[in-house]
Amino acid sequence: MVLSSDLVVASPHAQFALPEVLRGLFAGAGGLARVVRNCGMQIGTEIALTGRRLCSEEAVKYNLVNSVAATPESTLPEALELAKSIASMSPDAIIVSRAGLRQAWENGSVLDAIRATSDQYSGALRSSENLRIGLEAFAKKEKPQWVPSKL
C-alpha cells in the first residue's frame, strides 16, 4: 500500500516489507516496479528478494515514506498537519499537480507526462476561478480564499 501512496507519515514502530518471496510468490500487483522506482535497483532488489522487514527509519532512507512521526500517538496528528497544509492550497492546482506527478511516475517519460497533464488540464486551469483568486490575492498580498474545484 505504501508503494502506491502519494504521501506517508509512518509510525516510529511501523515495519515495511514485500513478504511475497517468503511464501513462494512475487509482488505481482505493481510492487516490484514501484519498489525499484522508489528505492533504486539495488535496494529494491534486496527488499523484493529477501522479504526483509524495514523499520520506519529505513523506509525514510529508501524513499518509501516521507517522514516518521515523533511518537506512535502523534502519527495521525502529524499526517493531518501535512494534509492541512496541502488543503490550504488551490484545489485546482493540487488536482493538476497530483495528476502531473502521477503521470510522470507511472509513465516514466517526462515529456509524455508533461503533454498528458497539459492536454488534460491546462485550458481548464487557466480559465479557473481559483487561478483568478490566487493571482488577485498575490497582487494584493492577501491570503487567497479558494473555492471548490470545478475541474
Image: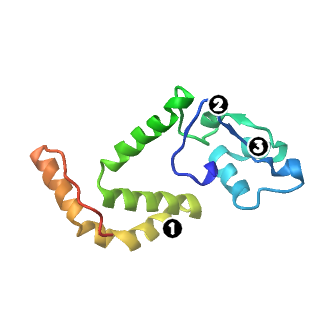
Question: Which residue is at 77% across, 56% downward?
Answer: 27
Dot 3 falls on a residue whose secondary structure is: helix
- In this view, which residue lies farthest toward the left? 140
At which x and y percent is residue 9? 53, 39
Dot 1, how many residues are within 10 Å of its Cα: few (below 14), some (14-19), or many (20+)?
few
**Is 11 drawn above or below residue 5 in the view shown?**
above
Residue that badge 3 annotates:
47
Residue that badge 2 annotates:
13
Left or right: 3 with respect to 131? Answer: right
Dot 2, how many residues are within 10 Å of its Cα: few (below 14), some (14-19), or many (20+)?
few
**Is 41 drawn above or below residue 52 in the view shown?**
below
Amino acid type at circle 3 is Ile
Question: Which residue is at 16% across, 48% downward?
Answer: 138
At which x and y percent is residue 108? 58, 60
- In this view, which residue lies farthest toward the front? 73
Q: How many marks?
A: 3
Residue that badge 1 annotates:
112
Mark 3 vs mark 1: in front: 3
Left or right: 57 with respect to 24? Answer: left
Amino acid type at circle 2 is His
Mark 1 vs mark 2: in front: 2
Quarter holding residue 131: bottom left
Query: What colour scheme was applied to this rendering of the protein?
Result: rainbow
Left or right: 129 with respect to 150? Answer: left
Mark 2 vs mark 3: in front: 2
At which x and y percent is residue 67? 53, 35
Left or right: 15 with respect to 96? Answer: right
Amino acid type at circle 1 is Asp
Question: Which residue is at 29% across, 66% downward?
Answer: 125
Quarter occupied by the C terminus: bottom left
Tag shown at residue 64 = none
Distance between mark 3 and mark 1 Cα atoms: 29 Å
